Amino acid sequence: MLARRAVDALPLPRTRAGAVKLIVSELVTNSIEHGQLSSGDRIEVRARVSPQGALRIEVRDPGPGPPPDAPGGMGWRILERLADRWGVDHHGGQARVWFELDPAMPARQR
């Protein structure tokens, strides 16, 4: 999957890459399964890593996004467990699910 390979290109500690891949895979899968997309629609994944190591990823698609009362599926549980913050909103006619991870602390400071 292209999104998982894109995560590999991010400057992330190896200890975080697996969690980020899992979240991104789940969000892209949700866009495919629930986004009501047509064959020409695109899913966009944007990532930003701050100089301090904080990460923000957004998964966007032109679908309606999840309804406010959407039942909590596996994807939401993964986000709750692994992300420091996350949300769903609409921006520029696109549904956007985003998540953030604070900078990883070195093992000796934990």
Image (tube, rainbow, N blue to C red):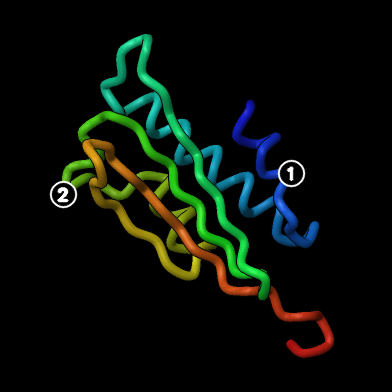
Residue situated in front as seen by the camera: 16 or 46: 46
Which residue is rendered at x = 23% and y = 46% of the image? 90
Which residue is rendered at x = 43% and y = 29% of the image? 43
- The single residue placed furthest to the bottom in the displayed view is 109
Secondary element type, mark 1: loop
Residue situated in front as seen by the camera: 57 or 50: 50
Q: Is residue 104 above or below residue 20?
A: below
Q: Quadrant of residue 38?
A: top left
Q: Residue 78 in the image: x percent, y percent?
A: 48, 53
Residue of label 2: 69
Which residue is rendered at x = 81% and y = 80% of the image? 107
- The single residue placed furthest to the top in the displayed view is 39
Residue of label 1: 9
Q: Disc 1 residue type?
A: Ala
Which residue is rendered at x = 49% and y = 63% of the image? 100
Q: Residue 4 in the image: x percent, y percent?
A: 65, 36
Position of 12 with respect to 92 (left or right) is right
Where's the N terminus, which quadrant? top right
Q: Residue 77 in the image: x percent, y percent?
A: 42, 55
Q: Disc 2 residue type?
A: Asp
Task: Give the label, 1 or 2, closer to the camera.
Answer: 1
